[in-house]
Image: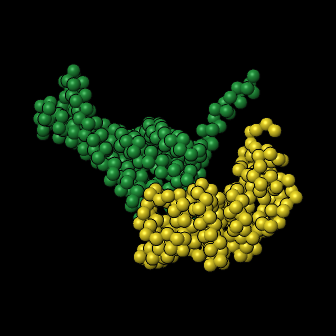
Chain colours: A yellow, B green
Amino acid sequence: MIELRDIHKSFEENYVLRGVDLNVSKGESLVIIGGSGSGKSVLLKHIIGLLRPDKGTVFVNSMDISEFDEEGLSESRKKFGMLFQSSALFDSMNVWENVGFGLKRHTHLSDSEIKETAIMKLKMVGLVDVEDVMPSDLSGGMRKRVGLARAIAMNPRILLYDEPTTGLDPIMADAINNLIIKMREELEVTSVAITHDMRSANKIADTIAMLYNGVIIEQGSPEEIKNTANPVVRQFIEGSAVGPITLEGMVR
Amino acid sequence: MLVKFIELIGAVIEKPAIGLGRIMLLFYSVLKIIPHPPYEFRNTIKQMLEIGVNSLPVVIITAVFTGMVLALQSHTGFKRFGAEGLVGSVVALSMTRELGPVLTALIVTGRAGAAMAAELGTMRVTEQIDALETMATNPVKYLIVPRFLAGMCMLPALTVVTNIIGILGGYFVSVMLLDTASKGYIRATWSYLEMQDIYSGLIKAFFFGVAFTIISCYKGFYTKGGAEGVGRATTGAVVYSSMTILISDYFLTAWLFR
């Protein structure tokens, strides 16, 4: 369903992606792991066309979206729902207006129908009686869940998650993990998540891929990754400061 | 030696040139996208309220006191050579040709231009603009076009208010405080005022509206660097817009009164 071929991307002097190849099949849940600054977010943004590669192609449903103009990209994006790291809720609107934003823009539903749909989506993510609240009055966990409700409002085929559990307490993080699994099962979506939370990755993934030095160095099921012989992957999943991966700015 | 000198020129010009180029590109994409549906009527009306109606209090205060001080200064100055009878004309011509459009533009830039940069800048650094794109909504169309159209329409409208209130302020000072005859002041106001004075001021206001909205939206839309970046964007929006207004004022005046 999604295929990235030989993706290269630089920002001024920073050569972030150095030939990434990735394949996501329909209905699969892929989690991309990697250190801070490894390019995970950059990679995710290529899938939905927020960034264009310097070299390489991005296929979504067998169409090369890296060649699309704004209008074509717009059409392609209607298949997607994305949950941002900071939730990215529109702070000039209340919760139901946020969740129903896509419906307001792209359908002819009335405001009351949109509000009803929004309330239903909010219920799916475990939120009730918040539809008239402003985003600034919500807690971090609630904002994340509203962001998720907004991402699923248009019944997308593909869901993208940018660090879904980062910044949440362990209980809320697990609640989000369960929601991600629930979305996959109830909505039968393909999902791509990026995270450095190994607990989350192991719980929600069918496949885990590790991004290091701008390329995918290993890809496999959570079991296979857990038993990897690759010292770089080992160091990351065990969470050790000692190993082949050096910390930025530090002397070895 | 010569190479070093050329390098120096290049180093100084590079950043402003890039900035100017990007602003022109944004201006072009705004113009290109305006005719395409969906038309953001609601957002545009909302911006007109914000930029126009909500600026009225501060614009009126500016206009009143500008008209008043203009009348006071010209009266005391002209008295030296016996030309106090011309105060009405001075106020009318100064307001309509120059002070009306320029002061209104500067005040509204400080208010609405700063707000645009801050709002768009905050949206940028919290990924709300990315979120709009992922929801198949063109952020230039949704955010910038309404502000652009509103600024373009509201600045001439506010300038009309400034002109009228300013002339009234001048009347108040001249007639109530400086004992000028009411009929004399009114006659002086109208006798030398021409249509060209009024519409040249409104043409200037139109250009100033285009300038401050594009510059402020540009600064906000391309903000980088968190809260500090938003602060820099807001200051930059007001400073560059103000400079552009003052510099273009000279050239527009020269062109309009050639």
Residue A240 visible? The answer is yes
**Residue farthest to the front, as pictured:** A171
Report how many numbered discs are placed on residues in the image: 0
Query: Residue A186, position in %: x, y?
Result: 62, 78
Q: Position of residue B64 (x, y in %)?
A: 25, 40
Q: Residue furthest right?
A: A229
Question: Residue A81's image quarter?
Answer: bottom right
* Residue B82 sits above or below residue A34 on the image: above
Q: Kindly identify the residue that appears in the image at 83 percent across and 53 percent down.
A: A232
Camera-nearest residue between B172 and B75: B172
Measuring 85% from the left and 60% from the top, which residue is drawn there? A228
- Residue at left 71%, top 49%? A37
The residue at the far top in this view is B80
Q: From the viewer's perspective, is A120 left or right of A152?
A: left
Q: Position of residue A151 (x, y in %)?
A: 57, 68
Q: Quadrant of the C terminus of chain A?
A: top right
Measuring 38% from the left and 56% from the top, which residue is drawn there? Answer: B48
Q: Please state if A169 lies on the left or on the right of B153 as rendered.
A: right
Q: State the image quarter where residue A158 is shown.
A: bottom right
Residue A199 is situated, as x and y percent measured from the top left of the image, at 70, 61
Quadrant for the N terminus of chain A, please.
bottom right
Q: Is B29 rendered above or below residue A97? A: above
Pick whichever, B217 or B26, lies toward us.
B217
Pick the residue in front: A28 or A128. Answer: A128
Horizontal relation, residue B196 to residue B235: left or right: left
Residue B203 seen in the current view: no
User: Dividing the picture into quarters, in which one does residue A238 lie?
Assistant: bottom right
